[in-house]
Every structure is written in structure tokens, then in C-alpha cells.
Image (cartoon, grey):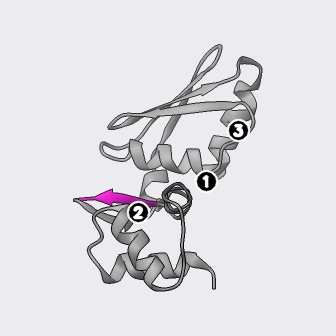
Amino acid sequence: MDLDPLILRLLEAHPIADQTDLLARLAAEGHDLTQSTLSRRLKRLGVQKVQGRYRRVEMAPVLRDVAVAEAPPNLLVLRTAPGFAQALGLRLDAEPVPGQVGTLAGDDTVFIAVLPDRLAEVKAHVERLLGGR
């Protein structure tokens, strides 16, 4: 059985506040995972801790009204609505492109560190993720 639907079902059915609880519930269903494996799966599924409970965060609202600016030689700056930068950073980290070194997200701004010779390529990738700009 694919674990992703089970993980999402458990998160919807129970107020899970920590990964240890989720690991125990998965073990009760016959699936033994390490914490690091679970953490990677949660990240890939777009699951975050919101108001003390793990939940899947929809990314669609995050992708609206994002301004992308270059800060050569190796930085992209994304501006979004207040409160959406961290979700946007997670989305970008979930589908990195070669040359993308890392992200740093605040409240309404995401900085993407890029290898200097890959700035245009990473910017194009980010714009595709944001809806084909």
C-alpha cells in the first residue's frame, strides 16, 4: 500500500501534533518508518505544522501574485502576499532545479541562492512553477 494516502488520512482523522505520534499510528497500521523518512514524505506531501497540528497546506493561493526579481550575480528575490513566503519556499524546495543552492523564507519574501552561472535557468524554472509566466 502506498503510504501517502494513509498518512493524509491519519492527519485528517486525528489531531497529530508531533511526528512521534504519527510514526506510532503508522506502526499500528503495519508500516515502520524512520523519523527522517517520514519527515521527507511530509515535506513532499506539502504537510506542515499549522496551529500545533500537522496538516496538508494547499499551495495554489501561494502561487498567485508573486513578483520575481533578479539580484545578480546569484540571488532571486520573490515577493508574495504576507504570510505566504514559507509555504512558497517549501514548494520551491520540493522541486529544486540544478543550480538552486537553497531558499530562505520570511513572511512575504523568499530569497533563492543560485549558482551564478545558473541564474537565468533557475529563474525560468521558478516562473514555470508559478504558472508559466
Going from N to C along the chain, the mark reached first, 1 or 3, is: 3
The residues colored magenta run 47-51
Name the residue at the left extreme: 51
Q: Secondary structure at mark 3?
A: helix
Q: Which residue is mark 2?
A: 57
Look at the numbered discs 1 and 2 and tell me whether their residues touch, using CB distance below 8 Å. Answer: no
Q: Which residue is mark 3?
A: 124
Q: Where does residue 91 sit, x and y in percent of width and height?
A: 53, 51
Going from N to C along the chain, the mark reached first, 3 or 2, is: 2
Q: Amino acid at mark 1?
A: Gly
Look at the numbered discs 1 and 3 and tell me whether their residues touch, using CB distance below 8 Å. Answer: no
Q: CA distance from mark 1 to mark 2?
A: 18 Å
108 vs 120, left or right, is left
At x 70% / y 25%, what residue is drawn? 119
Q: Amino acid at mark 3?
A: Ala
Q: Which residue is mark 1?
A: 131
Is residue 120 placed above or below 88 in the rendered structure? above
Q: Secondary structure at mark 1?
A: loop
Q: CA distance from mark 3 to mark 2?
A: 25 Å
